[in-house]
Structures are given as structure tokens and as C-alpha cells.
Image (cartoon, helix red, strand yellow):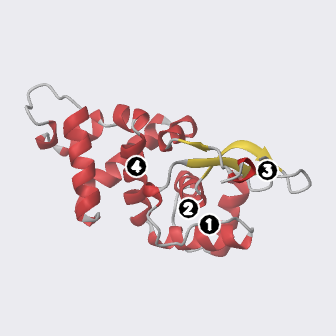
Amino acid sequence: MSDEKKIQVLPFHAVNEFMRDDYRLDVLHEVFSALDQATPMQKQLINRMFSKNVNIPGFRNSGLAPLAIKIKNSPTLFERSHEFSATIMECWSNLHPELKIAMHALLTERDWTLQPLEADRSLLPGFQIDWPKTDNFESLIKGIQTAKPDLKESDDNISLMAVWVGNKLPYNLFSEEESKPE
């Protein structure tokens, strides 16, 4: 692969730079509460990573702790584990199928290069860092709200879905007039 074809990526847990603490907890709560809806592999990965990396006093196996205690003790793992945060976000995105479809359509309309809708993005190496300046979170939120006015999703959910479906974090902003960063 030539040097100009290389894409810079950040690990998936870099998303924490863009998440408020309360929203991170909301995402973790949603995923842990609906873990039975995840694929068996995703469920096994989340439970194994949690049990191995989170120690909860009074539990030899932290995976057996009550749901509320698991949720309260999982942000640190989400903040520092590439694989855990990727699996959590993939499970979370699958809990919002309408938003995922709408975001994929919107980003496709805006000429983003995307993975297929059904692709498991947690298997990618990380987030790309090049983000079009014109597609800020506000414009993407407005785009989704205009395209799907009946969709009841928070601005935070729409923003996270843009990051996840687009597989990009807005670190290196560029405009179309500028040459895309190499």
C-alpha cells in the first residue's frame, strides 16, 4: 500500500473526547439493559471484557454483579478499551435501527464513503480523523430531523450515530475547496 493511500485512525475509545459523562452512562445503561438483543458473540465479548477488567468489591466474578452496579463501574473500561467501546457502540447502534438507516442515507447523500449499513463497524481498526467542515453535528442533526420528523431521537444519539455510521471523529476538519488531508 502506498503512503498516500494510508488512512489515519484513532482507537474507538477516542470517542470519549466528544461524550459528556452523563451521556456515556446513558449509552452504557441502554446496552447493558438490552444485552439479550445483542448477538451471542457481542454479549460474550462485553461480559468477558467486563469480568476481566472491572473489579467490584464483594464479587469474585464482577460479571455477576447487579445491572446497576455494572453500569456504574463500566465507564472507565469504556474510556480506556478500544474493543469494549467498539462493541458497546455497535450494540448501541443496533438498538436504533431507524436512526442508523436514516444516518446512513443522509451521509451517503452528502458523499461520505461508508461501510455497508449491515457491516459490523466494531471490526474496523478505529475512527478515521478527516471530517468535512460543512457536516458539523448541528447540520447532521437538522438533516435527520428534516428527513425523519417522526423519529424521536436525542441530539446526542444523532451525533453518536453520525460518528459511528460515518466511522469518523471530527479531529481533522476540511472543506471541499481544500484538498482532503492525506
Q: Earlier in the sequence, mark 2 or mark 3?
A: 3
Q: Residue at x 36, y 44 (%)?
A: 84
Residue 154 seen in render: yes
Asked if residue 103 is positioned above or below residue 53 in the image, the reply reads below
Circle 4 packing at 10 Å, graded few (<14), some (14-19), many (20+), is: many
Write down the residue under mark 1: 114
Circle 4 sits in a helix, a strand or a loop, which is it? helix
Foreground pick, 68 / 172: 172
Q: Identify which residue is drawn at 62% across, 49% down.
A: 128
Side of 52 relative to 23 (left or right): left
Q: Residues within 10 Å of mark 1 (few under 14, many from 20)?
A: some
State yes or no: discs 4 and 1 in contact (Cβ < 8 Å): no
Residue under circle 3? Answer: 133
Residue type at numbered disc 1: Leu
User: Disc 4 marks which residue?
Assistant: 27
Label 3: element kind: loop
- The amino acid pointed to by label 3 is Lys
Horizontal and vertical percent position of residue 23: 46, 43
